[in-house]
Amino acid sequence: KKARKYASPEYDILRKVRNDNPTFRIVIKISSAKNNANKGLTFEHMNQYISYFMPELMDEYLILCGKKANENGEIPPAKSMPAIQKWFRKKRDAFENEQVA
């Protein structure tokens, strides 16, 4: 970023490097981590949100996490974290859309 400023020492270094290496390219990568919708979405956060705003979904959440028996009396294996996060976002979005309407 400092090389963007004309006549800065970094600009001069970059200019010299580009003159010495005409095929030199600068690639700016944008991290996909910033666009991750699940960042910060932990089990604790989902548990607190469901407890406070959507307590009727707590049983379903615990079944997905493998912490409670389903209607057949069996404790199913826990779903993966991304699967539970996807389920949570879908339910949360539906809940928030209901509140707005």
Image (cartoon, helix red, strand yellow):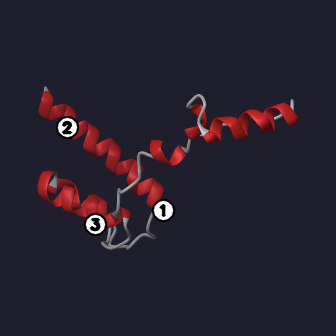
Q: Which residue is mark 1?
A: 80
Q: State the residue at coordinates (37%, 73%).
A: 74
Amino acid at pointer 2: Glu
Amino acid at pointer 1: Ser
Q: Which residue is mark 2?
A: 96
Q: CA separation, marks 3 and 1?
A: 15 Å
Residue 37 image offset from top left, x and y in percent: 41, 45
Q: Which residue is mark 3?
A: 44
Which residue is nearer to you in this view: 33 or 38? Answer: 33
Q: Is residue 36 above or below residue 14?
A: below
Residue 35 image offset from top left, x and y in percent: 46, 42
Q: State the residue at coordinates (58%, 32%).
A: 4
Residue 45: mark in rendering = none
Amino acid at pointer 3: Glu
Where, by quadrant of the figure, is residue 55 drawn?
Answer: bottom left
Residue 51 image offset from top left, x and y in percent: 16, 60
Q: Is residue 79 above or below residue 100?
A: below
| Label 1 vs 2, first from the N-terminus | 1
Where, by quadrant of the figure, is residue 94 drawn?
Answer: top left
Q: Is residue 94 above or below residue 79?
A: above
**33 sits to left or right of 92:** right
| Label 3 vs 2, first from the N-terminus | 3
**54 sits to left or right of 45:** left
Sort mark 2 into few (<14), some (14-19) or many (20+) by Cα contacts within 10 Å. few
Q: State the residue at coordinates (54%, 44%).
A: 32
